[in-house]
Image (tube, rainbow, N blue to C red):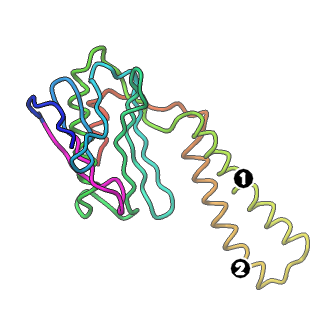
Amino acid sequence: MATGNVDKVIATSTFKPAILASARTFKIFDDRIEKWKDDELEDSMDLNAAQSARYVSMLAREYKFKRLDIARVGAKPFQLSINASFTSTPSNDPDLAGFYDAVGKVCSAMETAKPPITVTYGETDKVTKILFGIGLVAVLGSIVAIALAIITDVPKHKFMKGSIAFGALFLFGLQICWSYNPWKQKDVLTWAQLRTRLE
């Protein structure tokens, strides 16, 4: 069993990152943040090793995906993440409340890091372009499908049913393209500003 360091813990937060996942506990010290799974130390990050950070909040059908990635020297990013129901709020989902609490406490801890770093709000450029492409395919595909139905004189009742489905696909694609426009500049926040954006 891992014991970790014995110096004083300043703050802790616990939540399950997904319904079937084990709970994670984040412990904040003067100089580092630790991530624990059950009684095992899963990850630890020196506050002053952080190089950059990114906060992502996505909606996909009936789910919310949120994460905070902190890039650091010599290791993969230190991450806090959660997959929650679309209807989840901090008031009705204790895990989502725990996630926001953990991110807020990490924000407070990171304000003391040297040198100070900012937080990019939004997905990476690569993922943004992929999602934009998916949205564009949905938009163009729905337009082509409806146009072909008109050209080939599809029966009216079939056309109406198809129009509803492809109309929904068109709106979905449009929403994805709008949300993940690769030419839109992403916000760059201080840790204090990120904390105020949390629900």
**In front: label 1 or label 2:** 1
Vertical arrangement, residue 189 with respect to residue 79, above or below: above
Residue 137 is tagged as: 1
Q: Answer few, some or many: residues within 10 Å of disc 1's Cα (few below 14, many 20 plus, some between 14 and 19).
A: some
Residue 43, position as x, y percentages in the image: 31, 36
The magenta span reads 11-26
Q: In which quarter of the image is residue 125?
A: top right
Q: Are marks 1 and 2 in contact (CB under 8 Å)?
A: no
Q: Which amino acid does label 2 sit on?
A: Lys
Q: Residue at x 21, y 29 (%)?
A: 109
Vertical arrangement, residue 47 with respect to residue 96, above or below: above
Q: Answer few, some or many: residues within 10 Å of disc 2's Cα (few below 14, many 20 plus, some between 14 and 19).
A: few
Residue 151 is tagged as: none
Q: Residue at x 62, y 60 (%)?
A: 171
Residue 129, position as x, y percentages in the image: 63, 39
The span from disc 1 to disc 2 (Cα, nearest Å) is: 21 Å
Lower sequence index among marks 1 and 2 = 1
In the image: residue 14, left or right of residue 170 = left
Residue at disc 1, secondary structure: helix
Residue 59, position as x, y percentages in the image: 47, 54
Vertical arrangement, residue 129 with respect to residue 85, above or below: above
> Is 46 in the magenta?
no
Q: Which amino acid does label 1 sit on?
A: Val
Residue at disc 2, secondary structure: helix
In the image: residue 87, left or right of residue 44 = right
Residue 161 is tagged as: 2
Residue 7, position as x, y percentages in the image: 10, 28
Quadrant placement of the N terminus: top left
> Is 13 in the magenta?
yes
